[in-house]
Amino acid sequence: MRPGPDISRAPLVSDLAFERTGSFPAFHQRVEFDRLAELASELAGTGAALLVDAARKPAEVLGAHGLAPDAVHAALLACAEVLAHPATEGWVLATTGKNRPTRTGWRCAHWLPLPATGTSTQTGLLLLDADASRDGQTATPVLRVLASHAAGVLALARRSEQIEQYNANVLRESESRLNLTEHTAGAGSWLLQLSTRKVVHSDEFATILGLSDHEQVKDLESMVQRYTPEWRSGIRQRLERCAQNGESFDEEIQVLVEGGSPKWVRTVGTAVRRADGEIARIQGAIQDISAQKQAQQDTLRLAMRLTTTLASITEAFVTLDRQCCFTYLNQESERLLQKTTADLLGMEVWQDFSPGLAQRLKDQLTRSLHTNRRVELEDFFPTLGKWLEVRAYPFAEGLAVYFRDVTERRRSQEQLMLLETSVSRLNDIVVIAETGAGTEDQEPRIVFVNDAFEQHTGYSRAEVLGQTPRMLLELDPAITKLRELAQSLQQSRQARTELMVRRKNGAMFWVELEVVSVQATAEDITHWVAVGRDITQRKTAEDMIRHLAFYDALTDLPNRQLLLDRLQQALAASARSGQHGALMFIDLDNFKIHQRHAGPPHGRPAVAEGGAAPDPKRAQDRHGGAPGRR
């Protein structure tokens, strides 16, 4: 708390004293202990007495009588021997040397321990007597009663100190918690003492008003002047009515902040009465509500913008209360639901729908209210002839519901489902791949294959989806055709080729492949669609036909047709390159005679052997020179 005038933090002695003066009187224990020392001196008939706590090092004087302050220390030094054994009664004679007090006149010291109060005591009365003849005299019964009383007073004082320390700790902790609470809540407390018109306030109160560390609001008038001019008269009247009639107040008003703009605060005040019912003070608090005020203004502006936005939004939007009755419809919802706001306000949202649809809609909306979670529903509304998507979002007052016409989307989905079903049942292989544009490796990735793909290749969908089509090709033989395919796709967006595809078991088969591109825009290609047909049987038949056309059926050697084909190719190559070549004929000696006598079955191996490996020596003898000579 920041007080106006200086206020002692001593324990409370009298509420009435505080109400009269605004502060509390201090409690002085030393005075009481000095009186005990004086009484002990009178009862013992000595000139001086000390109440000493020998447990402290050095020993501490709690109360004194008959000695000047500078003589007390000398007396303790002279009596150090008995103070070293505080639980034992003892006597000390003053010497004439340096240890003898020079200004006190005592010659005999009597140490009388105080009775123990629950624990061993180390406190006692040190009686200083000018008569040395009393050395060794025991204490009188009256003096021992006084010692016992002094022990009780001392125990009570120590207990009071502990309680006071505990209360001080509790007060500090409470004040710390209060300051933390006020800081967290943005509220500061204040107290107006009516008898003095003085104000006491907390640190947070000063923080809200923008006061410096040592600046305070000291009185009522200073407090009133902190409010803006238009509010000063009102707050003064409320304080006066509270002081006179005990009328509490709670107002939202503005205060002046040094070095800043006015601040909105909530000011609360209530009267505090004494036991006799008279109003003694007013206590209250202020809370910084500038943020709440700003939020209210922002909310108002937002509500106005929201109303305008909802009215012009292209999506149908309605609000429902917790009974699912219409409370608001925008223009688009009127058009979609084919009714006006006047027709639907206060009506249940499912009222005009078929029983089955109404029950499904009711179940979903009720579940959203009970679970406080959004729900979505897509259903056909026969009365509207449309498919609608319904999305409901719960809030405190009910539901915010969006309706969207998804009839066209449903039709597209049905068409896509029919198309996908048809494609998946085709006998031809269908593969769809993303182009890979924008990815790190620029590789296309398979995103769809049909059933025929699985049947022909042996790969399942799970094995190839996300993979590159290269896994199906032997790149070395197919690289030329792939380049031709890519060039054709760049020119016409579609291409056709024949290449071999690898099955999962490693076997290869021929595929006639047609590829077309799918474009998102005129320039961007997103997917490739490839349709393939297994032409392995056709390729095999073509190879057989080609073999029969160019090879002899009996010997399986190249025939005259292949000779003419190769000769034509050689002539064309010679014409292009300008190089010359030669044609060589090889004859088999006596072949006709051998075949005539042995028969064709024995002649075929000879022809095959001669055509496959002609004898170089025979060729040399036939042409009269080395082999290869022209």
Image (spheres, rainbow, N blue to C red):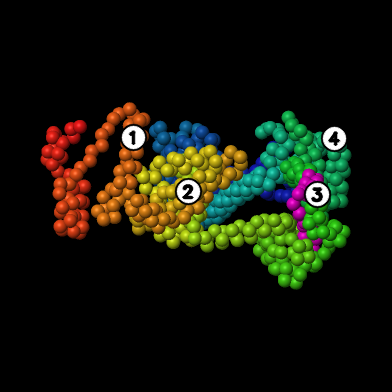
Q: Is residue 307 magenta?
A: yes
Question: Along the polypeptide, which appears first: circle 4 or circle 2?
Answer: 4
Q: Residues within 10 Å of mark 3 (few under 14, many from 20)?
A: some
Q: Is residue 45 visible?
A: no
Helix, strand or loop at label 4? It is helix
Q: CA distance from mark 1 to mark 4?
A: 116 Å
Q: Are marks 4 and 3 in contact (CB under 8 Å)?
A: no
In the picture of the structure, the residue carrying the numbered disc 3 is 311
Of labels 4 and 2, the one closer to you: 2
Give the residue displayed 15% in from the left and 57% down from the top.
Answer: 597
For disc 2, the marked residue is 445
Magenta stretch encompasses residue 472? no
SS state under label 1 = helix
- In the picture, the quarter occupied by the N terminus is top right
The answer to whether residue 331 is above or below residue 440 is below
Q: Please tell me which of labels 4 and 3 falls first in the chain.
A: 4
Say which quarter of the image contains residue 263. top right
Depth-wise, is mark 2 or mark 1 nearer the camera? 1
**Residue linked to disc 4:** 229
Q: Secondary structure at mark 3?
A: helix
Q: In the rendered image, which residue does mark 1 sit on?
A: 571
Q: Residue placed at 76% from the left, 54% from the top?
A: 316
Q: Is residue 627 visible?
A: yes
Judging depth in this view, the residue of 153 and 234 nearest the camera is: 234
Cα distance between the residues tagged 2 and 1: 47 Å
Q: Earlier in the sequence, mark 2 or mark 3?
A: 3
The Cα–Cα distance between marks 4 and 3, rounded to whole angstroms, is 43 Å
Q: CA distance from mark 4 to mark 2?
A: 76 Å
Look at the image and give the residue range highlighted in magenta: 304-329
